[in-house]
Amino acid sequence: MAGKRRLLILGPSFRRRRESGLLSALERFDGLFFRVARKYLRYVRDVDVVVMVDDLTLVDGDMPLPYREPVGSEWGAHIHRFSKMALEKAKEQNEAFLRRKFKNGKYVEVYLAMGKAYAEALPNLAQFNIKVVFPTYGGPGPKAQALRKWITES
């Protein structure tokens, strides 16, 4: 499958790098999956990155983002502040974003590194006829190991 690429979709992170100015989305967020991705992506050339930001919409991993204070006092609590209508709007925007990404057929696989609640803001990926890897078992450690393994496999 020469020339075929894989797509990594990272969910939003409560932990962020506070540097002023703009940082790419991949650099701005600093949660566990972002740290694993940054560490191992430097060794591969066939993985593109997409990041889900605070409003649950997707942006390219190299999209410049300013620092924004995370919502709430702990991670996970703010997902419930999104209404069903806001989730549906995000899902529509994400479907249009992914339709553009997948239109040339250059991706063979997509990996979702996010919680199930955030995945609700994604469209049904089966419509794109692409293999989806979405570990939903275990805690952060096993999921981070699965992400490392996925990134480094060729």
Image (spheres, rainbow, N blue to C red):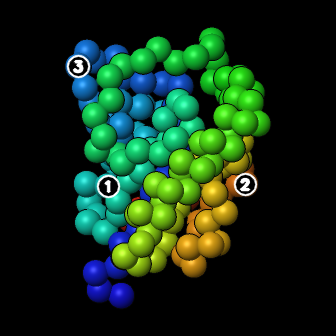
Q: Which residue is mark 3?
A: 21
Q: Which residue is mark 2?
A: 137
The disc placed on residue 41 is: 1
Q: Earlier in the sequence, mark 1 or mark 2?
A: 1
Dot 2 lies on which element? loop
Spatial separation of the CA atoms under disc 2 and disc 3 = 37 Å
Q: Quadrant of residue 65?
A: top left
State the residue at coordinates (30%, 40%). Answer: 63
Q: Is residue 63 above or below residue 100?
A: above
Q: Are marks 2 and 3 in contact (CB under 8 Å)?
A: no
Question: Which marked residue is nearer to the observer: mark 2 or mark 3?
Answer: 3
Q: Identify the image quadrant of the C terminus.
A: bottom left
Q: Is residue 67 above or below residue 55?
A: above
State the residue at coordinates (50%, 56%). Answer: 96
The image position of residue 132, as x and y in percent, is: 59, 68
The disc placed on residue 121 is: none
Dot 3 lies on which element? loop
Q: Earlier in the sequence, mark 2 or mark 3?
A: 3
Q: Amino acid at mark 1?
A: Leu
Question: Which marked residue is nearer to the observer: mark 1 or mark 3?
Answer: 3
Q: Amino acid at mark 3?
A: Gly
Q: Amino acid at mark 2?
A: Tyr
Spatial separation of the CA atoms under disc 1 and disc 3 = 24 Å
Crowd rating for badge 1 (residues with CA inside 10 Å; few <14, some 14–19, many 20+): some
State the residue at coordinates (28%, 44%). Answer: 62
Whether residue 113 is visible, yes or no, is no
Dot 1 lies on which element? helix
Q: Is residue 80 above or below residue 110?
A: above
* 68 lies left or right of 129: left
